[in-house]
Amino acid sequence: MSSVEKMIEPVVEYLYCRTPDAWVQAALENLGTILIDHAANELKAAQSAMTLISRNPLSLDILNKMSRLAREELVHFEQVLKILKSRNIDYKPLKASGYAYSMAKHVRGDNKGKLVDSLIIGSIIEARSCERFEKISSHLDEELEKFYLSLLKSESRHFQDYLDLAQKYSEEPIEERIHFFLEIEKNSILNPDDLLRLHSGMPTDNLKL
């Protein structure tokens, strides 16, 4: 088993579906949009980690893992910006997909439940990012393939970090909540989607960029 296969195996086992080939094809045809959205997602990931830090100032393991994660995501953000610049692609605001919100709207309202659910959702988003990086990498030019494969190590660790923290801070088994959010995530990935983004669903004939 190759190093890439070893890194992606637990991610694939965790998620409830693989990315459909139709998304890969649409992404390759609109790579500029995917790169711009990728940059935005790296920034959002860093911001989410910092939010967890600010809300849990006395939890040293959250502080340590999320500060490291935030730094790595910001480095990735800068790397994608550099790629955009080298390819003369302007970084600009894009309408966000409904992917993250489809899960976030079900987060529990109490403090403990909110923390655990947010950590589970974080693990799922990181896992899907990792899965999509691997799925698309072999179809890209040499520079981008090398870049996306280089992200697998950190992204695969990020998903596990989130999951480990969710298990630690929950007062009850989290398997049911994991299943609940993974089912929502699977539907987001497999259902028709008019918007093409890094985490969007099945592209339709009325695709918007």
Image (cartoon, grey):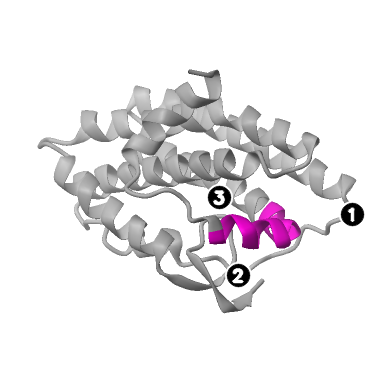
Q: For mark 3, give the secondary structure.
A: helix
Of pointers 2 and 1, the one earlier in the residue sequence: 1
Identified by mark 2, the residue type is: Lys
In the foreground, 56 or 95: 95
Say whether residue 23 is magenta.
yes
The answer to whether residue 66 shows anywhere in this view is no
- Tell me the residue that label 3 is attached to: 44
- Is disc 2 surrounded by few (<14), some (14 to 19) or many (20+) residues within 10 Å? few
In the foreground, 144 or 21: 21
Identified by mark 3, the residue type is: Lys
Report the span colored magenta: 22-36
Q: Nearer the viewer, mark 1 or mark 3?
A: 1
- Tell me the residue that label 2 is attached to: 95
- Tell me the residue that label 1 is attached to: 88
Where on the picture, by quarter, is residue 37?
A: bottom right
Identified by mark 1, the residue type is: Asn
- Is disc 3 surrounded by few (<14), some (14 to 19) or many (20+) residues within 10 Å? some
The answer to whether residue 183 shows anywhere in this view is yes
